[in-house]
Amino acid sequence: MPHPPHNGFYPRPLTKREREWIYWILPLEHPGYADVRHLIDHMVVLGEGRRGKGELILGYEDDTIDLSAPLAPVFAYGVIETDFGWISVTLREMENDQLSVEIVSQRAEEIPELFEESRRWTYSTWISGAPCPQCAAGVREVRMHTSGTSGRVLVLAVCRKDLRIWVCDAEDGVNRLIPVTNFYNELMLHKGIRDPAVALDAKRFFHELEKYSDPDLTHAFQTYNAMKMKVHVEGAIEHEHEESRSWFNAIRRIFSRHSV
Ligand SMILES: [Zn+2]
């Protein structure tokens, strides 16, 4: 084993604790997360990101930190609840063979060596039909698929209690968090709602979720995704009208992986 890292000296290997937390939000049962975990196996910490202490940039040993690209969208997220508050672990999409991971305490203090962990939860392990990872309540699910030959299956999931939206890609099992404001903006445009009291208050989305049909939410996701390319798809994204065979096959594949 290499020596423990000295503060400020890079590149360095991930500490045992950092690696355990990062791998926890990259479950092997979900192929999209497993792929990234296998890349991290060969990576080191190149240094700190622009968000300062707590944000590590992972990359290959000979590489130098590249901060030219804008902050990438979140790829995996989890929270460890402890006796001194929450520790959140946020891994972003890969940019130029580098990964940003933030491991921070909600109290913005240094994370102590010893603490009591009460529980932990991550969106990465969620599968269609499961409750919300954070609050264990049921979630609204909108089943979607892409048009054309690929026929990719996606599930939009909404937790009213935690004010969270995420999209599950049944192909690789990755659950991506969707920023509520951007998504709501697309929904308002689609519905032609211009009243600022409604259109600018994204939190209303969760209280008034029943007002919006599955096709409404699918349309909002499609236009949001076309702009932000959260999920790389070809062709249009359509609402899943029936309990189709491709849908069940895709879900079964995830379940069979999950039960390994
Ligand atoms: Zn929840």
Image (spheres, rainbow, N blue to C red):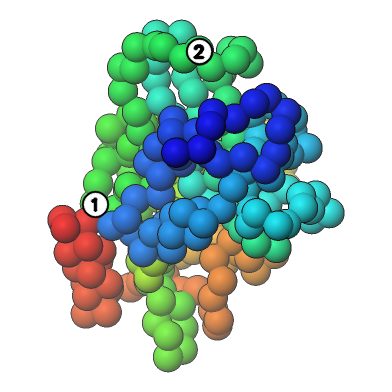
Q: Quadrant of the C terminus?
A: bottom left
**Numbered circles on residues, count:** 2
Residue at the limit of the structure toward the right, as seen here: 68
Q: Which percent across, then down, holds residue 231?
A: 54, 65
Amino acid marked by disc 1? Gly
Residue 32: quadrant of the picture = bottom left
Q: Nearer the viewer, residue 47 or 126?
A: 47
* Neighbours of disc 2 within 10 Å: few (<14), some (14-19), many (20+): few
In the figure, is residue 143 to the left or right of 8?
left
Q: Nearer the viewer, residue 35 or 174?
A: 35
Q: Which percent across, then down, holds residue 148?
A: 46, 89
Residue 11: quadrant of the picture = top right
Amino acid marked by disc 2? Pro
Residue at the limit of the structure toward the top, as seen here: 84
Question: Image point 56% across, 41% down: which residue?
Answer: 13
Question: Image point 70% across, 63% down: which residue?
Answer: 96
Residue 247: quadrant of the picture = bottom left
Question: Image point 21% across, 79% down: which residue?
Answer: 245
Q: Label 2, secondary structure: give it.
A: loop
Q: Which percent across, then down, holds residue 215?
A: 46, 64
The residue to which callout 2 is attached is 112
Q: Label 1, secondary structure: give it.
A: loop
Q: Nearer the viewer, residue 201 or 34?
A: 34
Question: Image point 68% across, 25% down: which residue?
Answer: 7
Mark 2 touching mark 1, by CB under 8 A? no
Q: Which percent across, then down, holds residue 221?
A: 55, 61
The verdict on label 2 being within 8 Å of ligand 1 is no
Q: Quadrant of the N terminus?
A: top left
The residue to which callout 1 is attached is 129
